Image (spheres, rainbow, N blue to C red):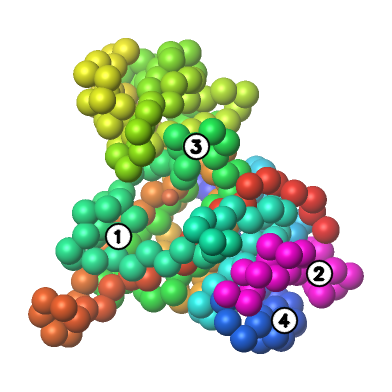
Amino acid sequence: MTGRSLPETTIDPLLRSEIDKLASTFASVDDAETAALDGDIAAPLHGDERWTAFCDLVSSTVQSRGYIVVRGLPADEGRSLLIVSRALGTTFGTYGAGRIVKRFRMSPWADGLSHTLKAGDFHTDGNVSRIPPVGTAMQCEIEDPGAPEYAEQRVAYLPEILERLASGSPDEVAAFEFLTKSEAAMASETAPGVWRGRLVQDGKIRYHPQSLRVAAKRLEQQAQDVEPVIAAIHRASMDVSLPFHTSPGDTVLVSNTFALHYRGECSVRFTKFPTEFESRSLLVLHMNDQGANE
Ligand SMILES: [Fe+2]
């Protein structure tokens, strides 16, 4: 949205050193994940007024803008990511056997949405889950070798997307109606079944263009052709969002219920074709609830 600044903060140096100290008590990311699941990984920071102020800022900014970019953290394989994510929510989402942090490294040889070099779509995570996570935390581990031309990131805030669509062209108004009034269908490429429901409900959104396309194919129909809707939502989301980039350690804390997130095309630099290359690496985790703000 023009005229507005990026919601970002640089972590206070004294808080950063407390986070570093806490992170260094975990011999590995596995240990940090265990601590995050067994109790409150950020407990040693309670009572620290800088931590309280940081949590307040994250909470109010995510509420009013949909996300916040936190700069000045170390790229430490996910330890600091686990700690600062406690400002976003209380309960960590897990996969596999008690794992929390996922690493996505972009590859010229991958087609999967998380690893491909192609530009992504504005979306929410876990969009066909029974209950999607409420928050996504993404920490840059290795910057895109072609940045800043490549790997642009954006977050679009739902109320602004809806306002923009509702007051737009007939295509955009149709997309608004589709989001807020139609029963849509979404499905995952990797799982059977189809999720059905309203994409925007009670001020919350679940949305992924690819999931709409997969469901349309699986059902051999869709309430309306989804492509004009997807195009209108993309346009509106671009219009209401700001481009930004992240350096190693920088962390984006984003609502997964009232914001859509996006990253642009990524690049690759081969050091030994075709097997060795430099590319963007990203650490991602999910929070299942908004939690208390300590
Ligand atoms: Fe995502």
Mark 2 to mark 3 CA distance (whole Å): 30 Å
Mark earlier in primary sequence (1, 4): 4
Q: Please give the name of the residue rendered at 44% of the width and 74% of the height, measured from the top-left corner.
A: 141
- Residue 115: which disc? 1
**Residue depth check, mark 3 versus mark 1: number of the one nearer the observer:** 3
Give the structural element (helix, strand or loop) at label 3: loop
Mark earlier in primary sequence (3, 1): 1
Task: Please name the predominant secondary structure of the magenta segment in the image.
Answer: helix
- List the residue tagged with mark 4: 22
Mark earlier in primary sequence (2, 3): 2
Find the magenta span and give its range.
30-53
Q: Position of residue 44 (x, y in %)?
A: 82, 75
Give the structural element (helix, strand or loop) at label 4: helix
Mark 1 to mark 2 CA distance (whole Å): 34 Å
Mark earlier in primary sequence (2, 4): 4
Q: Residues within 10 Å of mark 2 (few under 14, many from 20)?
A: few
Mark 3 to mark 1 CA distance (whole Å): 21 Å
Q: Please give the name of the residue rendered at 30% of the width and 60% of the height, measured from the top-left corner.
A: 115
Mark earlier in primary sequence (4, 3): 4
Q: Position of residue 189 (x, y in %)?
A: 30, 39
- List the residue tagged with mark 3: 129
